[in-house]
Image: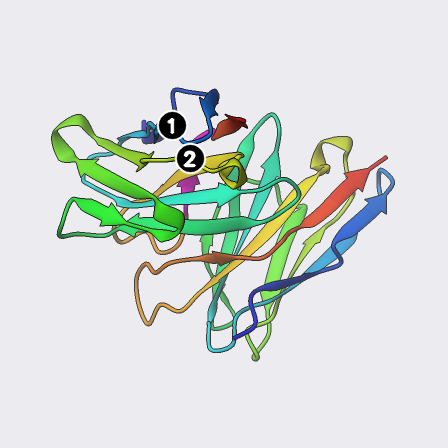
């Protein structure tokens, strides 16, 4: 099976712009989670989607949003970008029928905000 | 407060020597436990996980981890390190009934000396 894919791999934006990142989960996986990784804050959970519904949410401002499509692909959007949004954004998919299962991560999208 | 701690930020080990990475968690009940590895510029790869049962867990790449309830620890070990093991290692937990919201430790960067 193909792994989790994320596009684009690299992005450069300027402050105030918005950005959309895409994640395609492993075939058959219905849960997609997003994480932000920065040198200062480490790895932090953004949100999880399961069957097109947000199931969990981390402590991020409303500028961070996401959605999931019927084919389980997910997008996350960051509006009004700030310098502090520069990070590696990781997507993970899993195949839980319920509860917790192992998450498999994609290679990430490196976002740089200038 | 619930937390995951990796006390060692950096560890340097000689090739062929043994490696032990520490992870402690602070949760009311034993959570699900994971170890992931991240090579530079890459996403996270699952090494092993503990959900229940045998407290000594075998993973990929020759790694193992031991869950100790009395110490709230889940330490990762490898008997003989290879130069390719140089990477950053993350311990992560999910409280039971918390879906897929992983909480990560700060990571331990492993350097391997020839």
In the image, residue A12 sits, relative to residue B105, either above or below, namely below
Q: Could you say where residue A74 lies in the image, as x and y percent from the top left? A: 61, 66
Task: Check whether the beta carbons of the residues at disc 2 and disc 1 lie within 8 A of each other.
Answer: yes
Specify start and end residues of the magenta stretch as a single range: B102-107
| Residue B15 among magenta residues | no
Picture quadrant where residue B21 is located: top left
Dominant secondary structure (helix, strand or loop) of the stretch shown in magenta? loop
Q: Could you say where residue B27 lies in the image, as x and y percent from the top left? A: 25, 34
Label annotation for residue B81: 2
- Disc with the residue nearer the chain's start (2 vs 1): 1
Residue displayed at 52% across by 39% down:
A44
Q: Is residue A63 visible?
A: yes
Give the residue at mark 1. Answer: B17
Label annotation for residue A13: none
Tell me: A37 left or right of A81.
left
User: Mark 1 falls on what kind of element?
Assistant: loop
B85 or A112, which lies in front?
A: B85
């Amino acid at each position: 099976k193909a792994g989790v894919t994320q596009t684009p791999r690299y992005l450069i934006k300027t402050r105030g712009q918005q950005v959309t990142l895409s994640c395609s989960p492993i075939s058959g996986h219905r849960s997609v989670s997003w994480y932000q990784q920065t040198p200062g804050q480490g790895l932090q959970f953004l949100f999880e989607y399961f069957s097109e519904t947000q199931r969990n949410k981390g402590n991020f401002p409303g500028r961070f949003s996401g959605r999931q499509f019927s084919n389980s692909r997910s997008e996350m959007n960051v509006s009004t970008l700030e310098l502090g949004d520069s990070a590696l954004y990781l997507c993970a998919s899993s195949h839980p029928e319920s509860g917790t299962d192992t998450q498999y991560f994609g290679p990430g999208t490196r976002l740089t905000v200038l | 407060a619930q937390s995951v701690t990796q006390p060692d930020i950096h560890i340097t080990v000689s090739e062929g020597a043994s490696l032990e990475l520490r992870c402690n968690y602070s949760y009311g009940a034993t959570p699900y436990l994971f170890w992931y590895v991240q090579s530079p510029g890459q996403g996270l790869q699952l090494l092993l996980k503990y959900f229940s049962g045998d407290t000594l867990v075998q993973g990929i790449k020759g790694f193992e981890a031991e869950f100790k309830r009395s110490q709230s620890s889940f330490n990762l070990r490898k008997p003989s390190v290879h130069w390719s093991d140089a990477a950053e290692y993350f311990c992560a937990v999910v409280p039971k009934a918390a879906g897929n919201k992983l909480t990560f430790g700060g990571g331990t960067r492993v350097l391997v000396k020839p």
